[in-house]
Amino acid sequence: MLNSDCAMENFDLIVIGAGPGGYEAAAEAAALGRRVAVIERDELGGTCLNRGCIPTKALCRSAEVAMTVGNSSEFGISAGEPVIDLPRIMARKDEILAGLRESVGMVLNDVTVIRGEAKFICASTVEVNGECYTAHEIIVATGSRPVMLDIPGKELALSSDEILSIQTLPSSLIIIGGGVIGMEFASIFSAFGVKVTVLEYCKEILPPFDVEIAKRLRTSLKRRGIEIVTSAQVTAINPGLTVEYEVKGKSKTAEAEQVLMAVGRRPVVPEGLDGIGVRFERGAIAVDDNMKVLFDGSAPENVTLYAIGDVNGRCMLAHAAYMHGLVALGKAKLTDIIPAAVFTWPECAMVGLTEEQCAAAGRQIKIGKAMFRSNGKALAMGEPDGLVKIIADSETDELLGCHICGAHAADLVQEVATAMTAGLKASAISTAVHAHPTLTEVVKAAVPK
Ligand code: FAD
């Protein structure tokens, strides 16, 4: 099916998709002296920079400022009620994104950036706007897109992409899905004064997180006035924005001015790949531990294909995509020690195994816990609501996991992630001197004896 009219240009490596997986891999490969092209059909930076990590964190910061101003009297400061200027908040976010897109452009200085949609003509050749490009190595880094539940009225709901550019604050918002993305938006919009209701299908919010941490977050967010309904199966969205759902067989409804659907993401697979025998697992491109694409029959001989980041469905996080890129280039080994965070207020973060996963695996464990409320820095910050939980093997003291709910959880969990990566025992954390007064002292205090 090769298009014979197609002009052909050859590279050492072609990367499809300039998200965090693709652009970092392309820049790393170019730094090794290889002739690299990256193909992007949209803005540089992918989901992470344009519709994910960064825009949500810009909104999280505005939400935090609104909460801090709202609570200012607690700190002896009179500031009055905060006024939420959503267009200005969105404009600030967009300024941050524009600056970062420029930085990505600079990171790609030694890479040929091709604008347009890549389609596979054969395993070693892709076509973009009628031009053909070949390489002996191709990295597919095409990311993912939001999934919308196939229910009546689904078109009435906003996706996570769409809610990032609304200019008018709704008075009320129903969020379908209590995962990481749904809970971040719940925390943000509640801080902006919106009445938020979360409808989650599972028994607990944040399904991949340790249940104790998720429960703690749910309690904190409920205290902030967010309504959270678990075990809720949404069945329809009606005009006027009434959402129908069932809880334990009972039909219920909820009403709001806007509905956000945040029920997960699906890999984006470039056109033509399914025609060359690539294996798929639950819609994702199947790869081995070197990120090499698996084939149902024999693999093509003249090219090595890799799939990194969200498109391989292994771990839908920006830093995982980056790590996958390094693995594909042979510059790193695959690891499952990958910290994850949800930037709610309070923040939650985790690395390694949860208590439930340890129990399912029959591991003999010891658990240490420490509370933010007994930490001087947390009290001085006005952030007493928090918990650090560390899990270690009861025989060997091997660090198995760390789970945090509380201020700066995402930063704090990194100490344990680094210790786990270095193969350190749990006692290494309690032996290390921690600066006083800092939140890291809570991590130290949580090391199980
Ligand atoms: P992407 O970033 O999705 O990039 C893929 C790129 O490929 C896109 O630019 C797309 O346009 C391009 N592309 C697709 N098909 C083609 C084609 N055929 N031809 C050319 N180009 C193509 N992760 C975190 O780690 N921390 C967070 O705080 C966080 N927050 C998030 C918040 C939200 C609301 C969302 C939606 C996601 C968040 N994520 C977060 C997840 C993170 O954004 C993704 O895991 C990450 O972007 C995946 O990177 P990637 O390189 O695999 O793909």
Image: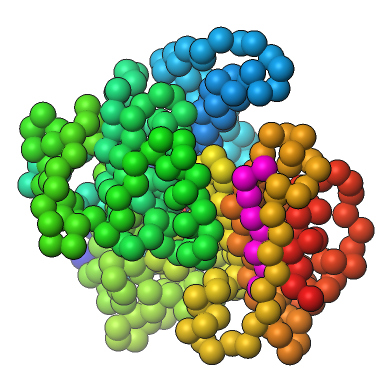
Quarter of the rendering occupied by the N terminus: bottom left
Q: Residue 23: image x %, image y %?
A: 54, 49
Q: Is residue 438 above or below residue 289?
A: above
- Residue lying at 23% horizontally and 55% vertically, measured from the top left: 232
> Closest to the observer: 402 or 269?
402
Q: Is residue 114 visible?
A: no
Report the span colored magenta.
384-391
Horizontal side of 73 relative to 249 (left or right) equals right
Q: Is residue 299 visible?
A: yes
Q: Residue 32: image x %, image y %?
A: 69, 58
For the stretch drawn in magenta, the main secondary structure is: strand
- Residue lying at 74% horizontally and 64% vertically, measured from the top left: 446
Q: Residue 45: image x %, image y %?
A: 50, 41
Magenta run includes residue 209? no
Quarter of the rendering occupied by the C terminus: bottom right
Identify the image's colour scheme: rainbow, by chain, secondary structure or one colour.
rainbow
- Residue lying at 55% horizontally and 26% vertically, measured from the top left: 67
- Residue lying at 39% horizontally and 56% vertically, measured from the top left: 205
Horizontal side of 24 relative to 300 (left or right) equals right
Q: Residue 228: image x %, image y %?
A: 34, 47
Count up the numbered dots: 0
